[in-house]
Amino acid sequence: MSANYSVEADPPHSVIRITMSGFFTLADIAGFVEARRIAHARLTCGPNQHATLNDLREMKIQAQDIVTVFHAMLADPAFRSRRLAFVVGPTLARTQLMRALDNREARCFGDQVIAEAWLTSENRAAAA
């Protein structure tokens, strides 16, 4: 299964919504990074003040070199999210993801609604 992804900005809520599936190549990652750059440019919040919701339920186990590239991509300070929520299935992809995150403010969920509620709960508390 080849890679598929979508990256959408939700400027009113300061959220980036990502869906990723399949097996990624270096070319796929380059395309994803460009799509992410375009989506981030649409945000109206300050740098690194957005949250990111990433649906990885259809993501396949990746080759180690691809995991290393994803790790570097997640560490890029220009796109760092204040909070990350991942929707994942019960596979080894979850283990690969947690290693790549390096203890950031991130959590994994099995349900997208719960993930989004956690992701935005900090915003609601700050607005109160």
Image (cartoon, rainbow, N blue to C red):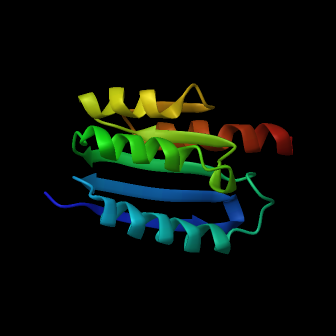
Residue that protrudes farthest toward the front in the picture: 65
Is residue 40 positioned above or below 59 on the image? below
> Is residue 90 at least partly visible in the picture?
no
Is 69 displayed left or right of 24 in the figure? right
Q: Residue at x 51, y 45 (%)?
A: 72
Q: Residue at x 41, y 48 (%)?
A: 69
Q: Percent x, y for residue 50?
A: 69, 53
Is 52 displayed left or right of 49 in the figure? left
Q: Residue at x 65, y 48 (%)?
A: 80
Query: Which picture quadrant has residue 11?
Result: bottom right
Q: Percent x, y for residue 127?
A: 84, 45
Is residue 63 positioned above or below 101 on the image? below
Q: Quadrant of the C terminus?
A: top right
> Is residue 89 at least partly visible in the picture?
yes
Residue that protrudes farthest toward the left in the picture: 1
Please count the marks in the image: 0
Q: Percent x, y for residue 8?
A: 51, 67
Q: Quadrant of the N terminus?
A: bottom left
Q: Nearer the viewer, residue 89 or 41?
A: 41
Is 61 displayed left or right of 53 in the figure? left
Is residue 126 positioned above or below 92 on the image? below
Q: Nearer the viewer, residue 126 or 72?
A: 72
Q: Residue at x 24, y 42 (%)?
A: 63
